[in-house]
Image (cartoon, grey):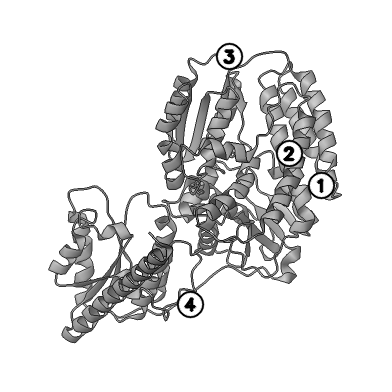
Amino acid sequence: ISKRDAEQAVKYALNAQKQYSSDIRRKAENIVRESRRKEEPIILLAGRPYHTDPLIQHKLSEMIANLGVNVISDDIVRDNSEIETQDTYLIKQWAYMNRILKAAEWTARQGNDIQFVQMTSFGCGPDAFLLDEVRDILHRNGKPFTLLKIDDVNNIGSLKLRVRSLVESLKQTPLRGTTEKFRTTEVFRKKDRTRKIIAPFMSEYITPLLKPIFKLSGYDIEVLPPSDASSAETGLKYANNEVCYPATLIVGDIINALESGKYDLDNTAVAITQTGGQCRATNYLALIKRAMLDAGFGNVPVVTLGLGRKVSNEQEGFELKWQKILPAALNALLYTDTLSKFYHASVVREKERGAAARLRDKYLNLAERPILENEPHKLVEYIHLAAREFNDICMDKTCPKIGVVGEIFLKFNSYAHQHVVRVLCEQGIEVAPPILLPFFMQGFVNRENKEKLLLEKKRIPHFLSDLFYRYIDKRIALFNRTASTFRYFTPFTDIYEEAEETKNIVSGAAQFGEGWLLPAEIIAFTKQGINNVISLQPFGCIANHIVSKGIEKKLRMLYPELNLLSLDFDSGVSSVNVTNRLLLFTHNLSA
């Protein structure tokens, strides 16, 4: 096919698509005009694109029409530039979500003859955040929100009953409620730079060093204690119960801290990381703001920490001095990952019980001063000393090994995964621990993959990103050389080599929910002779589950010696179930 023919075909296709969108929107507008002329009620039935399938939606649209109500879809707002949805907490990165938000905004502005009904399916990740936003838009304008959960059921009586109730209420023509203003938390302004910033706990390794790193940038940050049972309880109270488990715990930690009375709320702010990727974690900001408003803490600003292009930080007074803190942050990241490797290799070999933990805490405490003084090169010297001391506490011993991978928050948060890593160590099993470095290094591979797959235009000249990569690679090599004096140290691997190993398993375009990085880490373990791997996932983490479960068959074909266990966690998961599955998994392990 010639280039000219291809371009012409694409032009025709785009015009046909545009015409289709215009036709379907005009059809909906005609239905609205005709319905109003006849004074008939209308329901805008919104949902994911696949909800248009009559089998999936159980012919719900026909059932509504049979009740004497005209049905239109969210297509009525396609290409409608007059409808703006500024008043929302969400990061707008899904096309169908944006369309549903616009449809809700349009419905909210209409008379009582038009009402909004939304279909959702079990486990639809983005809907966990979208539903709250739609509900708020409608309620602020005095309209009810009807949500119908569409799953694989034969009896749709309950759905029919809810729709019939809505239709009957429409016939009563109730008065519209008072329009309310959009509420959000305080903006973090320049005068707020002296506020104490609290942030949720993540890992016992990198978390202690966040305070000195952010002090370099002029902020007083305090990391909250690790999550516990009260975190889950409070999180379930203030967060949508369909969000992922990490989000529940994070919301609970923040609300518990603000309710503790420990902080002067007029001089406190909250910080949360934001990936900027196609994951629900990008919208933790929305969840936290909503929870804080519901709990009465609207006077406390929320700021986001992240490097992603899609990161949303509308706080005019908060800006990290990346040029100043990046060397310290990079060295701290390598330092804590190295200490984690030292600790987990030593704790199952220590001559004296507790020696490994004491050394780990000692060197984490020592790292604070070099970071505060912006002399991160000293951290390499401490690794040299630590390697010698960890050698001294270890007896010569061969141990069975298990690698741990999974979702970024859950695999690091001990409470979230029910202390699985600690349980394994107590059984004398050496754990190859999850580390943070690959999560950040994958960005280099992701950028190249997006360009090769034509998913993104080149934004940064290659020579600049290559220069930055070489700088980081030299630091990694330095830490590898220094740490190798510890006889059980496993070096950091090259992220490009890891990505290359996954090409026969998953597309490089799978860059969310740990994406290709998950099989990359599993394969890296097998290359190191670690054939037993546990994957830790929050229940309902859709993207993560699709990758983690989806790659299992192909991995076993390519690496028949691999023994992979996936464990799902949420606030209601049985500890007995987790323990039993772990015991079965480790029963036949041998060194």
Please tell me whether mark 3 sits on a helix, a strand or a loop. loop
Relative vertical location of residue 290 with respect to residue 355 in this rendering, above or below: below
Q: Which residue is mark 1?
A: 371
Please tell me whether mark 4 sits on a helix, a strand or a loop. loop
At 47% from the left and 48% from the top, the residue drawn is 244
Distance from disc 3 to disc 1, alpha carbons, whole Å, reads 39 Å
Pointer 1: residues within 10 angstroms few (<14), some, or many (20+)?
many
- Residue 411: tell me if it is visible: no
Distance from disc 3 to disc 2, alpha carbons, whole Å, reads 29 Å
**Which amino acid type is marked by label 2?**
Ile
Mark 2 or 1, which is nearer the eye? Answer: 2
Q: Which residue is mark 4?
A: 181
Residue 322: which quarter of the image?
bottom right
Residue 43: which quarter of the image?
bottom left
**Left or right: 161 with respect to 312?**
left
At 77% from the left and 57% from the top, the residue drawn is 323
